[in-house]
Image: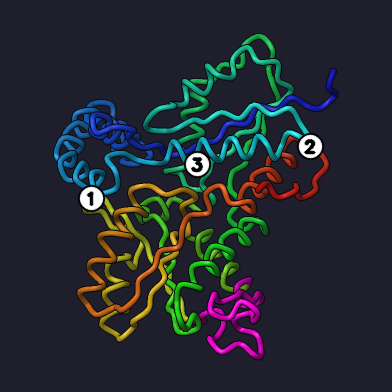
Amino acid sequence: MSDRKRVGVVLFQLGGPDSPAAIEPFLYNLFCDPDIIPLGPLGVVLRKPLAWYISSRRVKTVSHHYDEIGGQSPIRLLTERQARKLAAALQPRVEPRVVIAMRYWHPLTTEAVTALNGLPLDQLVLLPLYPHYSFATTGSSLKEWDRVYRPGSRSLPVTIIQQFYDHPLYIDAVVERVACSLTHFERPADVHLVFSAHGLPLSLIEKGDPYQRQVEETVRLVMQRGAQVAFRHPEFPSQAVGSPRGRRGGWPAAFTLCYQSKVGRAKWLEPSLTATLEDLARGGKKHLLVIPIAFVTEHIETLHEINIEAREEVEKLGVEQFEMMPAVGDSPRFIATLADLVLRAAGVEAAVPTLVR
């Protein structure tokens, strides 16, 4: 019999429609969340009618956007890949059972609870796949967990991982993706880096939401780490770009942080992605790399809002090369990040796990 700790891991994510028919109910669930649209005391009466109104008004446009990226969101498939890779990374140290809890579409949190019920576990680790804490993401997912989870006759120890925006392996995972994307440019040092995070209403920031501060710190750490590493350009595989002998320059120094995906008329974090790209293009910037800094998998905000809509707009304004950094996804360094977080939360030897390839 194994003496390894039996650890249940819950990966929380936003979720996304897995078919055209799921788009409207997904939107309804999203806009029904009081952490997305706070309505105060009137929420009990207004929330469902308002969610129905917004989702029914937006479904045609949103459906068209999904049509342009394949008809559905890839987020479930990509999160399932992360779960499998994480389980494999944990296997040498613990006996893992990794499940997914999506906030607004299947597999929902109730389905994750059902999958864990009855399993012989020693501990639960709750791991939202949002690097930065926000009331609207991590907070909402954990509230939903508290609403539906019933520990049963034997109460398990539960450890919650609130954020990992400054975890060294996570920073390295982002830097690795940026460096790879920069090799698509002839002169990487001339590229302007555009860090784009999902937006948030200013009302949440004013209530103490730490999201903006954490995003800014991630950007600072990525730029700091990026300035310390060399990477190779495909035209010069024997020379590290940025080395003394490199002929193509090193890590770019110019960067901007902006926010995307605003909904409604309330004031949100600024500057917006659209305004930022327009300003850069009109200012003569010809080579742009957009880095979706607060996203760990691809979904509609990256695949359509950035890679289709933003690309079309800046190309009209004279940008010669526009690239989008792929999300960290199931890259070895990001899976090692998650594994390290889980092992530390489970009280297992706090050593960086071997990278899973």
Question: Residue 27 lies in magenta, yes or no?
Answer: no
For marks 2 and 3 on the same chain, the one whose residue lies earlier in the sequence: 3
Q: Amino acid at mark 2?
A: Gly
Look at the image and give the residue range highlighted in magenta. Answer: 225-253
Residue 98, quarter of the rendered image: top right
Residue 52: x and y in percent read: 19, 31
Q: Residue at x 54, y 62 (%)?
A: 177
Look at the numbered disc 3 and give the secondary structure of its residue: helix
For marks 2 and 1 on the same chain, the one whose residue lies earlier in the sequence: 1
Q: Residues within 10 Å of mark 3 (few under 14, many from 20)?
A: many
Q: Residues within 10 Å of mark 2 (few under 14, many from 20)?
A: few
Look at the numbered disc 2 and give the secondary structure of its residue: loop
Residue 46, quarter of the rendered image: top left
Residue 342: x and y in percent read: 69, 39
Find disc 3 in the rendering and name its residue: 138
Question: Between 183 and 219, which is closer to the camera in this rendering?
Answer: 183
Q: Residue at x 23, y 29 (%)?
A: 21
Look at the numbered disc 1 and give the secondary structure of its residue: loop
Find disc 1 in the rendering and name its residue: 264
Given contact means CB atoms under 8 Å apart, are the residues at marks 3 and 1 in contact?
no
Q: Amino acid at mark 1?
A: Gly
